[in-house]
Each structure stands twice: as C-alpha cells, then as structure tokens.
Amino acid sequence: MGTKSGIRGLGFGVVGRFCALLWLGFCLPLPAAPELPSGGKVLFPARPGDVPTLSGLAPDRMKVVRVEKQAWTNAWEITVPGAAANSWDYQLHGQVSQGVEKGDVVHLRFFARNLGSMTGSARLGVVVELAGHPMEKIADTPATVGTEWECIDLPMVIPANLAPDGWMFNIRLGYAEQKVQVAGLQLVNYGRDIPVATLPRVRASYAGREPGAPWRVAALERIERLRKGDLTVSVRDAADKPVAGVDVHAVLQRHEFGFGTCVSPFLLASGPNADRYRKTIKELFNCAVIENDLKWQQISRNGYGTGDALVGWLRENGLDVRGHCLIWPGVQRLPRSAVDLLDKPEPLRALVEKHMRDTVGHYRGQLNDWDVVNEAYVNHAVMDTLGEGVMVDWFRFAHEADPACRLYINDYAILASGDMLETDHQNHYFRTIKRLKEQGAVIHGVGMQGHFGSNITSPPNLLKILDRFAGLGLRIKVTELDMQMSDEALRADYFRDFFIALFSHESVDAILQWGFWEGSHWIPSSALYARDWTVRPHGKVFEDLMKREWKTDVTGKTDAAGRLVIRGFKGTYNVTADLSGKSHSATVAIGNGGGQVTLHPR
C-alpha cells in the first residue's frame, strides 16, 4: 500500500516558480470555510519549487485554469481517464521539505470540486504518510466533492520526529473517470499550542453507516440464520428417565468461524508485554497466520527454526494455523537464489518446486491452510519467465506434499477497493482464479487481504464483491485486515460494519487481522491496542463482538421432557447440568445440523 515510485510532474524553472507563486496565492480560504487559528508555520508550500506533482498520469492531464468569483484566481484541473488498478496510482503528490516533532499538531487544507463524473461527484483519498516502507499513515480519509467548491480539512498529531522530506501528502484520484479542480492547498504546523480536537475536519463516511441501514438489518438476520444453530440438551437420571427442572449452563468455547490474527516472533519473547500478548491471543482468537517467518526469503536466510516454534505454540494452545506464503513471485520478494535464475527457466522451475515440496512437507499435518501464491497482480516476475500456467503446478506441488491442507491464493485491493466494483485488479484476480480452476489446479479458497485507509468500500459493495467471487465456488477468507484511519469514530463504525458484513456472508469462513498490538504491528497506529495496552475504539468494538455480542453463554432449566433447546453460535461448547449438588459436563459442537447431548448428573 502507499505511493508508488517514479513520480512524474512539472519541472521547476519558469513553470515551477510560477506554480509556487500560484500555490502560495491559493492560501486565502473561502469565506464559508471553517475558521483556522492564526499563526503556525507553513510547511507546504514553504520554498520555491514546492508544488504538487502529478503521479501516474501524463503531464498534460493536469493544467492550471482560471477560476472566477473565488478567493483565488487559479486552480489545478486534473482529468482522470478512468479507474486505476489502485486509487493511489493517480494522485497529486507533495513531498514536505520541513521537519516536524513528535506531538506537533498539523493541519492540511485544500478546496476541490467536480467538473465531470458519471455520478455527479468526484471521489478523493487524502493521505499524509511517511515516505518509506510501509508508508505508515499519519492521517488518512476519503472525501467526496460535488460541483461546488468544498473545503477539505484534515488535522493530525505527528506520531514521531520526522525529518525534512521524510513525509508527504497525497490526494488520490484514481477511483473513476472524473475531472477535478483543486486549489488553496496549505499544510500548517501549529506546534503544541492548538488542541487537535479544535481544528476543523472533513467528516468522511460511507454508504450504509447510519443506524438501521437496510443492509445491516438484512446482514444481522443472515447471521442469526447462517451462523447459529440449535443445541438440544437432554438430562436423564440413573434410571435413564428424563428429569425436569434441571439447571443447564452452555458456554461457547470456540467459534466455528475463524477469528484470527497474524503473529510475530514476539510471541516467543519473555516479559510482561509478551505475557499479555500471548494471553490476548488465547482470549480473542481461534486461528492465526505466521506474519513473516514462513515466507521464502525468511526461510532461505534463517531456516525453519522460528517458524517451527511459532507453529508449535499456536497448535499447543488450540489455534488453527495458516501458512503464508509459499511464493510471492516478485523480484523484491524472492530469495537471491531465485532472483539469480529469472533468466534461466528450467533451473528456476526446479528451485521453486523444491522449495514448495520441502516447505509444505516440513509442516505436513501442522497447518490448516497455505497461501500458495501471494499478490500475483503486481508480483509476477516468476510467471514472466515460466508462464502463467506454472501456477497450476504450484498448487499441485503443495497438494502432493500435504493432501489435507487447504490451498489459497491471496491478493490485496479486492475488498479494499475504494468502493469500486470490477477494477482491473479485481478482474485480474477473478480471471486468474477462474483459469486455475479450469486448468485443474487444486485450489480450495480465495484470500482477500483487507488493508483499509481512505479506500473504504461500503458494506453493500463489500457484499457485492463477495457475491461475485463466491460464484467461483470456493471458500473465502479475509487474510490481512487492518485499518489506517485518523478518524477514530469512523474506524470504529467501519470495523463493526465490516465484521457484520463479512460474518453474514455464507461463503466467508474467517477474518484474520494483520496484528493487534502496537508493539508488534507493521502499521502501529492500526493496532487494536496501544503500546501500553490501552484499547482503541475499534479494539473495543472487537472485544464487544468476541466477548458479548457474538458470545453464547446461556442458562436454563429442562422442560417436562427433560430437554432444553439452546440457540447459539456454531462452534464448540461446554455444557453442564446441575441436579441436587451433582453435575455432569460434556463438550459438544453446534454445526450445520445443530447439536445434541445427553447428560446424567449423579
């Protein structure tokens, strides 16, 4: 995720000097815009040549135009020819030449309007992020503008000391065919004198967020129907006769549906934070995926030792384990031994096969799933050498090495599409899976990553995307969920609705998050828990789902026939019957056909 390299834009010289003056002149706000505090240090534009550049589109797609009856006389006009594979492929980009300190309050403002789109409004993604991988977001929000000028405000607190040119802003444009004008852009540092909560903020949202939204009503009804079943508990005495009025207690111990997280080697560490990390995994999750240590690059450098220890702990503590990933077929993601063979097809073919058979064989019987191929849309160096059809062989190698393991393909920007349907990325993924099936690949499931920021997809469209891929006849798992949003209320609401939508879809088997604690997370600000284990608002949403809303804990008494029927979430239960100080407990599952158990307290 994040800005791609190779940004193209206007050169400096005469044009650059003109544009710098132009953007400095834009700083007068519209009279109707929310008032900003006086003072502050202007971070952008701060020097001659500080002008946004156009990324991903030809320079002639952006021009300076005159604007009438506004506080400025000129604006940038960008013509987007159509949806890009990713929203960030087409964007206005600004490198910030000024450094800031941790705790500084910074505010980004600009004005925008739509001059042409299929929907009557233009869609933007506004992102302030670090310049290096993994492009951690400082602030990130979607925005929609109509045909009148609208003010976009994005305040933020700087999370760490940032060096000059170590961070940037981007206005993402690649959502659809649209013509957009942008003006009045200014980035200001107010230091620590202005509380961030007092600064204006664009209130981003998504379709279907409102209480009582029809999609949510329907989804909750599906959850009741699809994710629950009836458990019939019978209580009988020593003579095998039914006993009425017996107290029965049934508690869900483990969901049938997968609620998971990735884990790092921190799982194996010592100390209070590591203890809390392990405790939280056991309390909240029933499945896990190894974040990095089963990837080919890591195995080639470090062997299987760390992966073995991680898999072992997870299995000992009752979690299902996913392997990620057998091949990530891009140059940057391959071990050196494979990169050196990219111009030697047969040795490369043999090396990949050996790695797959060795690795899957090493973990035979220990993993429930393997991601066989990861992100083939943008990482295809190996297929460029061996052909697309080689992926069929990869699934065969994995299946032969562990026939009981379920095999997945995995990619990003499928659900996290910025509310777009049938993007190039989605279509490529669909065609790839369809071709694999037609060519006889042993493939069991579709992995959809789920890295969200300004690319929010509304729940109704999430369900449409799931419906489309469910038509391929494979199971679906969300494999790498995280949400980078500076608006905590928005993130909490969307996190809740994402889980409701996905849990309600009959083809989805699991949702795995890409970490949960800030101290061990690739995007620390996305974690459910801060470094001191304070739960963030979206973490509270997840706790409420796991510990209350989607937790079955029922007590009742048997009827005259000695029976009690309990409606509960599918999964494994501990059921206890108490009669006159005597009890009997049993473990029983509620599955697609419900469940039943007979208890004999004596």
Image (spheres, rainbow, N blue to C red):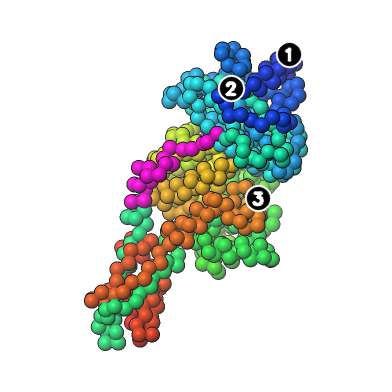
Residue 14 marker: 1
252 with respect to 335 (left or right): left
Q: Callout 1 environment at 10 Å: few (<14), some (14 to 19), or many (20+)? A: few
Residue 242 marker: none
Give the alpha-carbon distance from disc 2 to disc 3, as whole Å: 53 Å
Given the image, on which type of amino acid does mark 3 rest?
Answer: Gln
Q: Is residue 563 above or below residue 336?
A: below
Residue 297 marker: 3
- Mark 2 and mark 3 in contact? Answer it, CB < 8 Å: no
Region in magenta: 202-221
239 with respect to 290 (left or right): left
Q: Earlier in the sequence, mark 2 or mark 3?
A: 2
Q: Earlier in the sequence, mark 1 or mark 2?
A: 1
- Mark 1 and mark 3 in contact? Answer it, CB < 8 Å: no
Query: Which residue corresponds to the image point at 29% horizontal and 84% vertical from the top-left?
Result: 237
The C terminus: image quadrant: bottom left
Q: Which one is in front, 167 or 333?
A: 167
Q: Is residue 144 above or below residue 386?
A: above
Q: Secondary structure at mark 1?
A: helix
Residue 399 visible in the shown view? no
Given the image, on which type of amino acid does mark 1 rest?
Answer: Val
Query: Would residue 207 be counted in the magenta stretch?
Result: yes
